Image (cartoon, rainbow, N blue to C red):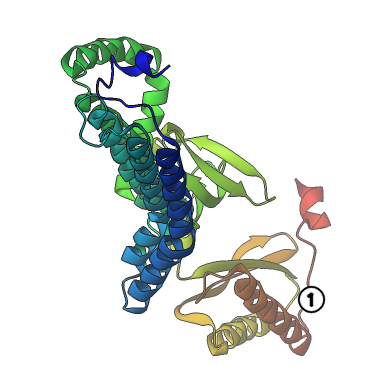
């Protein structure tokens, strides 16, 4: 059996029982070392770096843990085989590239694991600050680039003809590009969204036509994931978002409130004017309203009724707070209507309907 391997390893020797025992001992000892010394040692080192104020470096060390341990075991397996056949496989011309390929693989695998970790936890890139829209987008691109670089790096060890391969890829890419124009449009649309940064993950956005209204959950190479108001998930092609005005409702610092009341035209004008001033005063006194812009006026007249228009701004972007303030103003108006004996009428006044 061993003669069949001599074309690859001319100096190979049949193993003895002692060689077999030594090889098994190396593997078992190496497994115990990587399990009970190397693994906790790397974890301890990561915690030590984190305690020193370098959380990003600590994350990288911890994510390389698995790749380092697997590479360590690969080295021990090759070492045990070298002992078994009495041929140093690390430097032998027939197996050296195989060993280097394994090391290249685990090196790039460690980088890939780091990118995967940050893709799942993009806020960790900024050590806990608000995550940027560019982070998950470019992390996905980086994962693809790492796989391509790893493939070409390993191929170069085996003297693979990369020039011919790249030429073929280029010609094939041109042909494919014509067939995936829409996909490319969404891809470049996603890049445009990422570079312009009109919103971040977690922002509440809406389009001008109100067909899209919800919270941004994720953005990838082709589409953006949005959670709608009814808790549904919608995948929106990036090209669709790029070609429409987008309102970032999360960036608002104030919320506008508008209310209408219809009062009978039989109410005394002086009492109505006094009511308008009193409502304006009550809105001004509210601690959460914007004092610079408060509009209260009789702005419309219909047979049998006036329309009382109220507009003000609340210093918040929280919908719950805005509704609470609006409720306070509604109750204040109700009390003022009672105090001034103002008669209200329905919005669709019957007299108005009869005269139309």
**Front-lying residue, 326 or 19:** 19
Q: Is residue 324 above or below residue 240?
A: below
The reply, left or right, for residue 210 in relation to residue 239 is right
Residue 316 appearing in the image: yes
Residue 200: in sight, yes or no? no
Instruction: Please give the name of the residue rendered at 69% of the width and 76% of the height, measured from the top-left corner.
Output: 327
Residue at position x 52%, y 37% in the image: 236
Horizontal arrangement in the rendering, residue 117 relative to residue 61 (left or right): right
Question: Where, by quadrant of the figure, is residue 350 drawn?
Answer: bottom right
Query: Residue 173: horizontal and vertical position, in percent?
Result: 30, 15
Give how far across and how far down residue 125 sits, in percent.
36, 60
| Residue at the far front in the pictured view | 17
Closer-to-camera residue (166/316): 166
Q: Nearer the viewer, residue 146 or 87?
A: 87
Could you tell whether 320 is left or right of 70 in the image? right
Name the quarter where the C terminus is drawn.
top right
Quarter of the rendering occupied by the N terminus: top left
Residue located beneath label 1 in the image: 343
Residue 64 percent location from the top left of the image = 37, 54
Vertical relation: 46 (above or below) 53:
above
Q: Measuring from the top left, give residue 60's x and y in whole percent.
A: 35, 59
Label 1 Cα neighbours within 10 Å, binned few <14 / some 14-19 / many ≥20: some
Q: Residue pushed farthest left?
A: 163
């Amino acid at each position: 059996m061993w003669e069949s391997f001599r074309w690859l390893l001319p100096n190979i020797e049949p193993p003895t029982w002692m060689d077999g025992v030594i090889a098994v001992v190396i593997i078992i000892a190496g497994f115990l070392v990587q399990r009970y010394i190397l693994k906790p040692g790397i974890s301890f080192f990561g915690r030590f770096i984190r305690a020193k104020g370098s959380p990003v470096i600590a994350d990288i060390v911890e994510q390389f843990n698995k790749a380092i341990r697997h590479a360590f075991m690969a080295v021990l397996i090759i070492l045990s085989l070298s002992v078994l056949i009495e041929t140093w496989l690390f430097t032998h011309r027939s197996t050296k590239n195989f060993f280097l390929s394994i090391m290249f693989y685990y090196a790039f695998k460690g980088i890939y694991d780091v990118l995967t970790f940050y893709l799942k936890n993009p806020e960790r890139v900024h050590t806990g600050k608000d995550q940027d829209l560019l982070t998950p987008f470019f992390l996905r691109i980086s994962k693809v680039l790492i796989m391509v670089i790893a493939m070409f790096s390993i191929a170069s060890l085996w003297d693979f003809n990369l020039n011919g391969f790249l030429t073929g890829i280029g010609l094939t890419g041109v042909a494919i590009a014509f067939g995936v124009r829409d996909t490319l449009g969404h891809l470049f649309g996603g890049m445009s969204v990422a570079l312009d940064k009109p919103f971040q993950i977690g922002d509440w956005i809406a389009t001008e036509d109100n067909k899209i209204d919800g919270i941004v959950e994720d953005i990838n190479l082709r589409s953006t994931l949005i959670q709608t108001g009814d808790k549904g998930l919608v995948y929106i092609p990036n090209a669709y978002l790029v070609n429409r005005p987008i309102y970032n409702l999360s960036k608002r610092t104030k919320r506008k409130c508008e209310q209408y009341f219809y009062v009978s035209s039989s109410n005394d004008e002086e009492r109505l004017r006094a009511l308008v001033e009193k409502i304006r005063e009550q809105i001004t006194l509210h601690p959460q309203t914007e004092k610079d812009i408060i509009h209260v006026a009789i702005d419309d007249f219909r047979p049998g009724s006036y329309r009382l228009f109220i507009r003000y701004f609340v210093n918040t972007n929280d919908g719950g707070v805005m509704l609470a303030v609006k409720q306070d103003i509604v109750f204040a108006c109700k009390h003022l209507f009672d105090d001034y004996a103002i008669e209200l009428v329905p919005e669709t006044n019957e007299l108005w309907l009869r005269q139309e």
